[in-house]
Amino acid sequence: MSLAVGCLVATFVLLSVLRVPIAYAMFSGSIVYLWVSGQDVGLVVDQTMNTLSGLYVLLAVPMFILAANVMNATTISDRLWAAADALVGRWRGGVGHVTVLVNIVFSGISGSAVTDAAGPGMLAMKMMRDVSRYPAGFSAALIAAASTIAPIIPPSIPMILYALLSGASVGALFLGGVVPGLLMAGSLMVAIAITARTRGLPRGEAVPMHKLPGVLGRALVPMTLPLVLLGGLFSGVFTPTEAAAVAAIYAILLGIIVYRNLGPRTLMAVMLESARQSAVVMVLIASAFVVNYAITSEQIAVRLADAVSAWHLQPLAFLLAVNALFLVLGCFLDASVLLLVFVPVLLPAAKALGLDMVHFGVVVIVNLMIGLITPPYGLLLFVLAALGRVPLMEIVREIWIFIVPLMTVLLLLIVFPDFVLALPRWAGMIK
């Protein structure tokens, strides 16, 4: 490691420890790198503008954020909750199962774990704590774990970013995430069922059969959005970027025309908040590209690829090692840093070993989502602690119930690539 890279890392670590926003820490580290290496500091602007200007697919990010925020501002979450409750609420621990089902459907709209936690997650928190009297820590831990499904079942903002880095097909990544997302949901529901029996969690009230069609009918329209997106992508009617615009327009039309609860003031507030959130994401992406310039200049990725080749690692051994590393780093680093900084370093080595970029991407993103709920840094733990006003240590004590099944799913995805690749192959997106 050169002195300039060492200064970059030291600056980033120091500012991160001081709780400086990740994007600013990365920009600062990059400026220090350029200064120490004797390069023009103006390259920060050059790398940022030249890289971002040609990335058409990045338009999908603010569109998906807007769609999710519109859904949160209308009655979509309530309708989805009522439908899921009618289906599985009568089971022991039913409210927990309902939370997972709602997240599966909402995952097909938002593409963001934090959005799911702050949107339908808060409704789930109220139902579990106030209605069913679940322990606060358990409720928050379950919501955090269920929210990790959002970036796995398409659409997915992390998958769009990974596609930019790897050159993998966004559509193939989206389809590759369907089965893993359902496996994650199934594993969480098994954990809920076991916990419900051991702790005697209550059953919900059964919805009478004559009311069931009406409850499900109220949720039918919003449940069609994921089908529209996947159908359009699969048929080639629109690209992933265009799918994001379709999702945003669809959500706005639902709020204005169908449900009539999205007035001008609310829509303006939603757009302003979506613009703020989009700006945060874009600044983070821009800062990562400057760091990646330093990585490229120092040929760190090339050296790592050469080292891996020299070790004669098998693809499975490499995948296991990478995931073990990310699970450890995910305890201390933000998922966005791992995705935008560490993944590009590993991509040349993964390609040299012949790993499928879709399989590698989905596995890595599942790993990063587990990192969002892994103490001590897990971002979703802090989000739920703040929004739900639950002591952080209570959530940390309960979260392990759900980390274990999610890690089991991760291992299955590593060992059996067909869980990821079957659907994209069937759709003819990959060989």
Image: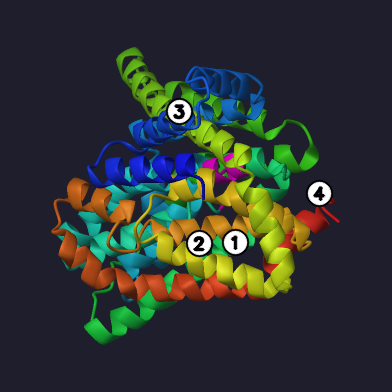
Residue at x-position 39% and y-position 70%: 403
- Sequence order check, earlier mark of 4 and 3: 3
CA separation in Å, label 2 and label 1: 6 Å
Q: Amino acid at mark 2?
A: Asn
Q: Is residue 356 on the magenta stretch?
A: no
State the SS at label 1: helix
Which residue is identified by label 3?
66
Q: Amino acid at mark 3?
A: Leu
Q: Which mark is residue 429?
A: 4
CA separation in Å, label 3 and label 2: 26 Å
Q: Amino acid at mark 1?
A: Val
Which residue is identified by label 1?
363
Q: Residues within 10 Å of mark 2 (few under 14, many from 20)?
A: many
Q: Amino acid at mark 4?
A: Met
**Residue 252 visible within the image:** yes
Point out residue 159 in the picture as x, y percentages from the top left corner: 59, 45
Residue at x-position 54% and y-position 72%: 409
